[in-house]
Image: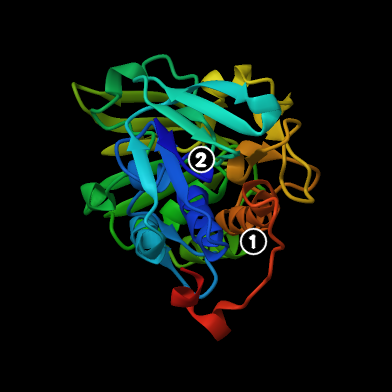
Amino acid sequence: MIKTDILIIGAGPVGLFTVFEAGLLKMHCHLIDALPMPGGQLSEIYPKKPIYDIPGYPTILAGELVENLMEQIATFKPGFTLGERAETLEVLDEGSRFRVTTSKGTVHEAPVVAIAGGLGSFEPRKPPLENLEEFEDKGVDYIIRDPEVYRNKRVVLAGGGDSALDWTIFLADVAEEVTLIHRRKDFRGAPDSVEKVFELAETGRINLLTDAQAIGLRGNGKLTDVQIQSKEKGEFFQPADNFIPLFGLTPKLGPMGDWGLTIDKNAIVVDTFDYSTNIPGIYAVGDINTYPGKLKLILCGFHEATLMCQSAFNRVFPEKKISFKYTTVNGVEGFQ
């Protein structure tokens, strides 16, 4: 039996930062994650991906951000149950405590549960190409874990969101040739990234094809060409060593979908006052929650975690009055 003040489901960046904010209020945290290491998607899917919207860092690699967060929370000594998925939730003592049991039978109890599970369990969205699976792991990738794999290679990316834009910008300095195809003229990503991609195209550093899409793949045991249908150029084959469709992830809540929480389109509905769910004592922060105006950004998750911890304090220490203090005055050591 593992007992703690706040039980955090998900050890991604928002879950890790929750430990820091809770620690400032002298609340101890324990984290559960199905992955074998902390960091969530940042560690598992794109540790080498650059992130541009973390305050104070013009750019930081995803893996480096995780390392910094782990260093930041080390002083508060959180516990971890890794490689196990949170399976069942029991409400105890008329709602004053919760018991969460994992896929391997590890039992946890806490007066507060904070769900920071990112997108939950997920799988990549795949384009409808007839012979796509034939070239999986033979030139077709859905996730970029190590960009060095593509050094001096001919790479074709497909997509119109932040991931496709960011990796196009990054791989322009790594790959021999980079081609980005998008079925529309307008992109969904950050305006600054869109501008950088168009600048790279204008200077000839990448090939940019809008109003275009991949319609087939060609190769002999390994990918050699991507068949493209373009409104401007018609149908043609683009030589490629790698094809990387970045169409996002299909999220699934998994067992949490059966916990009695209010769900809207695979996300947990919360009150923006404190990011509480419909079950008192259970909160949801980060990409896994939804509310009017929701933005799925790490920095937004950090904000949500901060306000959530202020509310959680009243459940963990109902007899105490919260006293807000600035870290610039007290330092982190002053909160231990």
| 24 versus 258 height, above or below | below
Q: Residues within 10 Å of mark 1 (few under 14, many from 20)?
A: few
Separation of marks 1 and 2 at Cα, in angstroms:
37 Å
Helix, strand or loop under label 2: strand
Residue 279 picture location, percent across and down: 72, 30
Residue 285 picture location, percent across and down: 62, 45
Helix, strand or loop under label 1: helix
Circle nearer the N terminus (1, 2): 2
What's the residue at 50%, 26% (across, down)? Answer: 100
Task: Please give left or right for residue 211 compared with residue 172 in the image.
Answer: right
Q: Nearer the viewer, residue 127 or 289?
A: 289
- The residue that disc 1 covers is 191
- The residue that disc 2 covers is 7
Query: Please, what is the three-letter code of the amino acid marked with disc 2?
Result: Leu
| 191 versus 210 height, above or below | below
Q: Is residue 205 visible?
A: no
